[in-house]
Image (cartoon, coloured by chain):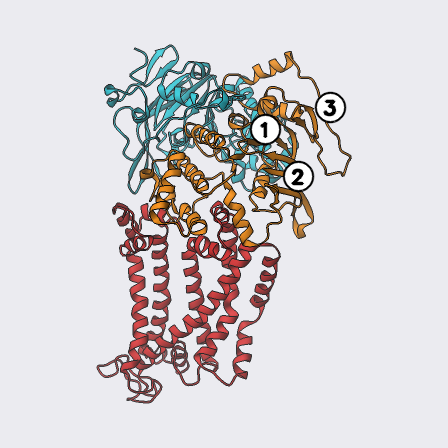
Chain colours: A orange, B cyan, C red
Amino acid sequence: MLELSHVHKVYRVGAFGGAKLRAVRDVNLVVEPGEVVSLIGESGSGKSTIGKMVLGLTKPSQGSITFEGKDVTSLRGFGEKKEYYRYVQGVFQDPFSSFNPIFKADRVFELIRSSYFPGVADADWRKKVLDVMDTVRLDPDNVLNKYPHQLSGGQLQRLLIARALLLDIRLLVADEIISMLDASTRIDVLNLLADLKERGLGILFVTHDLSLGNYVSDRSVILHKGAIAEMGPTKRVFDNPLHPYSRHLLSCVPQLHRTWAEVDAELAADPPEDVELPVVAEGDDSAPLVEAEQGHFVGIDQS
Amino acid sequence: MTLRVNDLKVYYQTLRGDVHALDGVSFDLADGEIMGLAGESGCGKTTLGKSLIRLDNRMRHIDGTVELDGEKLPISDDDAMNRYRYHEISLIPQYAMSALNPTRKIGRMINELLKARGVKPATIADELRRRLELVGLDPEVLDRFPIELSGGMKQRVVMVMSTLLDPSLLIADEATSALDVSTQRSVVESMVEFRDRGFIKSMIFVTHDISLVYQMADTVMVMYAGRVAEKAPAATIINDPQHPYTKMLIGALPEVGSTTDEGRLEGIPGTPPGLLNPPTGCRFKARCPIASEECSETPPLVEIEPGHWAACWKTGR
Amino acid sequence: MTNVSGAPGAADSGTAPEPVAERKVSETLHFARRNPKLLIGLSIVLGFLVLGLVGPLFIDHDPNEYVGPQTQSPNGEYWFGTTTFGQDVWAQFVYGVRSTFIIGFLGGGIAFILGTTVGFVAGYKGGIIDEILNMITNVVLVLPALVVLIVAVAYLDVKGLFVQGLFIGLTSWPWAARAVRSQALTLANRDYVDLARLSGRRTWRIITSEMAPNMSSYLVMSFILMFGGAVLIAAGLDFIGLGPSNGVSLGMMLESAMQWSALQLGMWWWFLPPGAGITAIVGSMYILNVGLDEVFNPKLREL
C-alpha cells in the first residue's frame, strides 16, 4: 500500500547552506493494509522526517514514496493533496501543540467537515462524530465543547485519532503519539491502534521507545543515523537482533523484570551469532540491506 | 539515617486557591540508599524534589519537617537553606546544561560555582579531574563550551559538578529522561558508582519511568495525587506490589518483546483528581477497582512488612 | 504575554460559568463584556472617533478662519480658547481629530495590510519566496522614508490627506512585515498548522484562520504602532509644509503652537488639547490591546 523506495533527505545547514545534514539515507520500506510497522530510533535517526515525508509535509531529496501506486512526492496542486489526505492522516507527538489553543478542541472535527463533507446535514454529521468517538472510547460529554487545556493528553490524542477516522483513511502515521502521555493512559492509546489495525488500517508507528514499539507492531524497523540498521518481523528483531546497533540498543533499554546486569550476563553466556553486514564504499551514500533470514534484513554498520 | 521527611505539606498558591501538591508525605531514606521516586505527571514527585532544596516563590511550606543527618532543615527559609545547598543537598535538573551560559567555558563555570559557595577551586581541582575521568570524560572538557558537548556528556558534567563537595543527598529530577537509551544507561550507571564510592551518601531519583528505576534503585516510592502510595525495595515494587495503584501502573507497562497477540494490557481508567480541591479519603478511590466504604477515610501509610510501606485499607491486614 | 494574571477582568470571568453549546462569537462577547481594560480602551477610542465624525458638523466656520479675539483662554464661547491669531482651538481640535483618524487608518491600514501579507506569506511559505520577500522588505526598510516622502510629495500636485496616507503606508510597512514574519515562522511549525494542512485547508485559510487568530493581539499591536507612526510621520510632514494645504491636523496644531511660542507664553490651551488627544488615542488603543489579549486567550481567562 505504502512504499518508500531509495528515499533520501538532505538538509542544507549552516551559513549559506554550505554544510549538508543527511537526515534520511536510502530508506526502503513497505506498509501493508492491516499492518503496524514501527519505526524505532534514537534522536537524529531520521524517524520523524520519514513520517513527515509520508504525510507530504516535507519532500524527499531523492527517491520515491508511493501510496497505492501513486507517487506522493509529485502530487501537484491543492486538489491532489487534499484527495491524498482523505486516505492518509497523521497524529503528532505533542497533543497540546496539535490543537490551536484559542479554539475548542472539537474544532478539529469541523475542519474535516468543512473541507471534506460540506454537504452533510447536521444530524448526520453528529451521528458520524459520535460514532468515531465511540471507536476511540471517548465520552462525548467529557470532551466536546472543551478547550484543549481542559483535557488530558490522552483524551487529546484520542480526539486526534477520532478526527482521522472521520475520513476514509487507509494509512495512519502515528509520530511518537504516546511519548508525552502517562504510563496509565499510554496503553489505552496503544490498544486503540491495535483495534484500528484489526479494521484493516495500515499504521506507521514512529517511536523512540523499544518496549512500546514492539507491543503493537507486526514489523519493526530500527533506524540508525538515517539508514535502516535492521528490519523484520517484530518477534524476530527482538528475539534475535542481528545488527550490532540493535543489540546495543536492546541491552540498554531498561526492562521491567530484568536488570541490565542480568541482560549482559545472558548475552555473555550465550553470545549471538554474527551475520555478514553489507558494506559500502567511502562516499557512497546508498545503504543496502541483506536478507539474513526470511523477511529479516540487516543494513550497514555506521558506528 | 540520611533523610527523614515527616508529614510534609507543600501547597502551590494560585489565584483560584491552594493546590495541594504535597499533602502529608512521610518517608525515610537510609545511608547509601538510592530511592526511585515514581508516579504520573502531577503526582507531586517534582514538588517533593524541589521542596527538599528550594521552594520557588509560589510554593508554601504548610506543615511537616525534613531532617537531614539528624538536623532539621529550614526548608521554608530560603536564606537559611543556602548553607545546605550544594554542600549537603544537591540537585540535577532535567535540562541543567541548557540553562547555563553558553559563552562560558565549563571549567570557568565550575570555578565560579565553587567560589560562590565559599570553596577555593584549587583545593579541589585534582578531585574534579579524577571524577571526570571516572564518568568517562576527558578532563579537557573543562576548556570547552557547553554547546560543544552532547546531551549525555552535559548531564555527566552536571553530575560531577553537583557532587564535588560530597553532599549527603543528591536529587536527580528526570535527569536522564531527555537522553537516548544508550546514553541514559551509562549516565545512570555512573550515578550508582558515585554512590558506591561514597561521593554521595544517598540519592532520590525522580522519574516517570518505573523500568528505569528498577535498574538502579534500592527502593522505590510511588506517589499518587500528592501522597505516598507505596514504598518498598525495588524488586518488591516490580514483582509483588500491594497498593492497587502500583499494581495497575506496573500492569500497564508493556515489556520488551511482548505484543498484543499475547493478550492486551490494560490502562487505568479515569484521570488523577485535581489537587485544587482534592477528594476526601483515599485519593485513588475513584479509579480503584476494589474501593469500598472504608476508603472514604484517608488510609495511613503503614509498614505491612519490614521495609514495605503502603497506604491502602486493603493491604497489611 | 501570558503573565497578565491578577487582571480584574480575567479573575471575574474565571468564576463565570462557561456557556455551553453557544457559538464562538457570542462566547468572545461574553468575556469581552466583562473586561474593563477592553471596555475603557474601546470607549475612549470610540469617543474620539465619534468626536472626529460628529464634531465638525456643529462648527459652521473653517477651522483656520480668524473668528474671534486673539489669545483667549478657554471660555463659554470658545471652549478651548483661541490662538494668537484668533482661531478657534476647539474647531481646530475636532477637525484635527478627524484628520488624525483618517491619516491613521489610511496610512496605518495600508502599511498594516501590506506588511502582514508580506510577513505571513514569507514566514509560512519559507524558502525562496521568503528570501525574495525578505530582500524587498530590507530594501524598503533602509530607504530614507522621510526623504522619499518629501521628494514625492513635493513633486505631486495634489497634496490631500489621501495622498499623504498612501505614501506613508507604502513606506512604513516593512516593520510590520518583519514582526509578523518572525511570529509566522514559529507558528508555521506548530503541529496544529500541519494538522490543518492534513485537513485539506488552503494556504490562505490556514493563515487567516489558524495563524492570524493566534497572534491577534500581536496584529492589533502592530496596527497600533503603524497607526501611531502614521500620525507622527504626518505631523512631521505637516511641519515642513508638505501637509494637506487646506486642512488641519493635531500634528499641525502642535507644530504651529510650538512655532508661535505657545509654551513660553503660557498658552496651554493651544498645545495641550492636540498633545493630549494624540496621547489619549494611541494610549487607549494600547489598553484596548491588552484587554483583547485577555479576551482572545482562553488561558488568560481562567487564571
**Residue A120: horizontal and vertical position, in percent?**
39, 49
The residues bearing labels 3 and 1 have C-alpha atoms spaced at a distance of 20 Å
Q: Residues within 10 Å of mark 1 (few under 14, many from 20)?
A: many
Chain letter of the residue carrying label 1? A
Label 3: which residue? A276
Label 1: which residue? A220
The reply, left or right, for residue A205 in relation to residue A9 is left
Give SS at disc 2.
Answer: strand
Q: Residue C34 carries which label?
A: none
Image quarter of residue B44 = top left
Chain letter of the residue carrying label 2? A
The residues bearing labels 1 and 2 have C-alpha atoms spaced at a distance of 17 Å
**Residue A281: horizontal and vertical position, in percent?**
78, 34
Dividing the image into 4 quarters, which one contains the C terminus of chain B? top left
Q: Can residue C176 be seen in this view?
A: no
Please name the amino acid that badge 2 sits on. Ser
Above or below: residue B212 compared with residue A100: above
**Residue C137: horizontal and vertical position, in percent?**
57, 64
Q: Is residue B60 visible?
A: yes
Q: How crowded is mark 3: few (under 14 residues within 10 Å), some or many (20 or more)?
A: few
Q: Residue at x 50, y 30 (%)?
A: B175
Please name the amino acid that badge 3 sits on. Glu
Judge by depth and name the residue closer to the eye, A53 or A76.
A76
Label 2: which residue? A5
Same chain, labels 1 and 2? yes
Give SS at disc 1.
Answer: strand
Above or below: residue C49 compared with residue C121: below
Above or below: residue A126 compared with residue B34: below
